[in-house]
Amino acid sequence: MTTHCVTITLNPALDLTGDLDTLNVGSISLVKKSSLHPAGKGVNVARVLSDLSANVTVSGFLGADNQEMFCQLFEEIGANDQFVRVPGSTRINVKLVERNGDVSDINFPGIQIDQAAIAAFEDKLEALCETHEYFVFAGSLPPGVSPELCAKWLEMLNQRGKKVLFDSSRQALAAGISAKPWLIKPNDEELSEFVGQVLSTPKECQQAAQTLANKGIENIVVSMGADGVMWLNQGHWLQASPPKMSVVSTVGAGDTLVAGLCWGHMQQLEKTELISFATALSALAVTQVGVGVNDINQVRTLQKQTTVKPLSELESE
C-alpha cells in the first residue's frame, strides 16, 4: 500500500470562472461573481488526492511569469513541486457558468514548450520513476508537445511497470491509447469522438470500451455524468450509480473521479468499494464550486447510497 503518487499537468491554466444568469453570445454578458484559481486537470487531481491524505508530487510545464498562485497552492496542499518552468505566462482559461447549470469553456492553447524544457521534463520523469509507482497524466497538450511525444512518455512509464492513469481527449487520447496506459477514463463524449460515432447508451459505450480493452488496456473507466460510472477490468464490468445530486457545477468532477480511482487503487480497496468510493467522490464534487474534499464523512455517506452492480458481458459478435 502506498500514499505516494505523481500528477502530470503538461498544459496547466489559471481558471477564470464567472457566474452569470445567461450567456448572451455575440453581445454583452454581465458576470455576477468571479474567481481566478490555479487549475489544469492534473493540478485538480493533485488537490483532491492531497485532501485524501496522499503524498503528491506535481510536474509538467509552468510559465515562469505568473507562477505565484500555483506555488501558493502547492505549498497549501503540501505537494512536492517538480514543475519545469518555461519562459512566459501560463494560459488563462475562461469558464462561464449560467444559472441553469450550463458551462461554456473557452480554452486557450497554452505556452510554447521548447526542446530544453522537454529535456528537463524527461529528466524529472526518469528520476520520479525511481521512487513512484502511480502516475496520473491528465489534460491537454501545450504547443510543442505532440501526441506522439506524450505517447512516448506513457510508453516509457509502461515499460518500467508503472501504473499510469491517463485522462485526455482528441489526438492525445488516440495516441496515448497506443502506449497502453494502465487506466484510461474517457467520458461518453470523449469515447464517442475516439470511435467516430455518437454513443448514446451505456451498451454502446460498453461496446466501444471493449475495443480498447482488446488493445491491451487493463482498466477502462467510462464516466457518464448523472448516469454514473462503468468500469471494465479483466473482462468484467461494474456499473456504479450515485443518487441524484443537486448540481452546482460539473467543473472538476471528472478530475475528482480520477483522483478517487487513483487513491482507491493505492489503498488496495476491493473493487466494489473502490468504484463506489470514486463515484461518490465525483458525485459530491458537482454540489460545490471548485475541487477538493471538505468533509470525507459526506463522501462516506454518499458512498452508502451509491449502488454497484455487475453488468452482463457483451455477447460475442
Image (cartoon, rainbow, N blue to C red):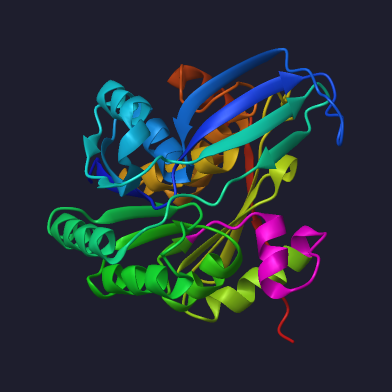
The residue lying at 37 percent from left, 42 percent from top is 263
Residue reaching furthest to the top: 32
121 vs 168, left or right, is left
Q: Toward the viewer: 153 or 280?
A: 153
86 vs 23, left or right, is left
Q: Work out whether residue 70 can be spotted.
A: yes
Q: Is 203 placed above or below 239 here?
A: below
The image position of residue 297, as x and y in percent, is: 47, 18
Q: Quadrant of the C terminus?
A: bottom right
Q: Toward the viewer: 63 or 4?
A: 63
52 vs 106, left or right, is left
The residue lying at 77 percent from left, 19 percent from top is 20
Q: Toward the viewer: 285 or 297?
A: 285
The residue lying at 54 percent from left, 56 percent from top is 185
Q: Over which residues does the magenta segment extend?
A: 184-203
Q: Is 79 placed above or below 182 here?
A: above
Image-quadrant location for residue 241: top right
34 vs 178, left or right, is right
Q: Toward the viewer: 10 or 90?
A: 90
Q: Does the magenta stretch include residue 200?
A: yes
The image position of residue 25, as x and y in percent, is: 86, 35
The residue lying at 70 percent from left, 43 percent from top is 225
